[in-house]
Image (cartoon, rainbow, N blue to C red):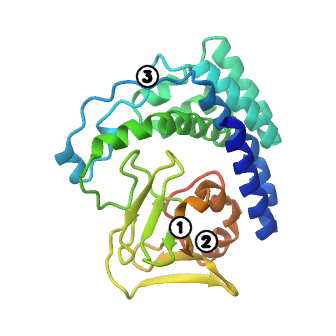
Amino acid sequence: MMKQRIETLSGIMDREIEKNPHSREIIGAFRPVLIARIRFLAKGKLKSIPLPGFDPVRFTGGVSLVRQLRFFSPDDPWKEMVSAMTAAIKEGFPSLREDMDRLETAGRKGGLDIYDYFRTFPDHGEDIIKLWSADIPASPQGIALLLHQLMRIVLEKRRPDAVALIGGAEWKKGYCPVCGAFPTIALIEEKITRRWLHCSQCGHDWLFSRVICPYCEFEAQEGMDFFYVENRTQEAAFSCDKCQRYLVTLNRVSDLNDHELDVSALSLTHLDVIMQGKGLTPMVNCAWNTFEG
């Protein structure tokens, strides 16, 4: 099962690189990270836990599951997860090797408790990263990349049980119903033209109106645009004139299951460059769509 999933993921990454050669470097960097996540989850060291406290009324009002349920536990195998993911990050991001070494050393010596970040999640995260960056020291970018990967492992493991609690409860927000993050990419189906939003923080996909901006909830046909690169109509970027945000989008795709949307987001960074060059901001900043200079 694990071997087959890794082979499938590798094949998807190879096809995306062939289609968008500019993405070779960024996909190559994330390849060991994505594979390490699959391998760790397959080991079964991270267990399911009870998730009491779901309130469908609060959920319908826009309170995501992460603000109702405790996804993270101090008993989770944090040291094992850190070891697996720092090794993968060092392989994919050589410039962050020193940061990863320092984080591992701080953890072994008792000067760093990774769970401190997740204890109050999703609040106070930036403050903790700044504190660790100064104390360890390590770059905020390196710390954030590691924490995101740890977060994704835990949320991916527990997401199915959490989503099962939702039942028929309605969700009309543009941020993720599971973890509260805004989407990194959208997919519009070919035949019935529904729009799916994808969260890279937890991996959840949810349906959302095509005529409403996920970020500011502005609703109108005018004031919303789709940018296309010439002769590449399946690759687009939705933009909103009101909030000046954009969202990279796969347009009129036949099947959601034919794509690994995390990899698709990596392969479409040329659209991020173009849209940010127009003065627009992504709906959520992440490791591959934040550019300097």
Q: State how far apart marks 1 and 3 are (Cα).
A: 34 Å
Disc number for residue 248? none
Residue lying furthest left in this view?
Answer: 57
Q: Secondary structure at mark 2?
A: helix
Residue 199 is situated, as x and y percent measured from the top left of the image, at 49, 53
Instruction: Check disc 2 and report the residue beneath it.
Output: 276
Q: Secondary structure at mark 1?
A: strand
Give the quarter of the image for residue 252: bottom right
> Amino acid type of disc 1?
Thr
Mark 1 to mark 2: distance in Å? 6 Å
User: Which amino acid type is marked by label 3?
Assistant: Ser
Residue pointed to by mark 3 = 73
Q: Position of residue 45 (x, y in %)?
A: 57, 21
Residue at 60% x, 15% y: name it: 111
Q: Quadrant of residue 175?
A: bottom left
Task: Please give the residue where the numbered disc 1 appears in the rendered image.
Answer: 281
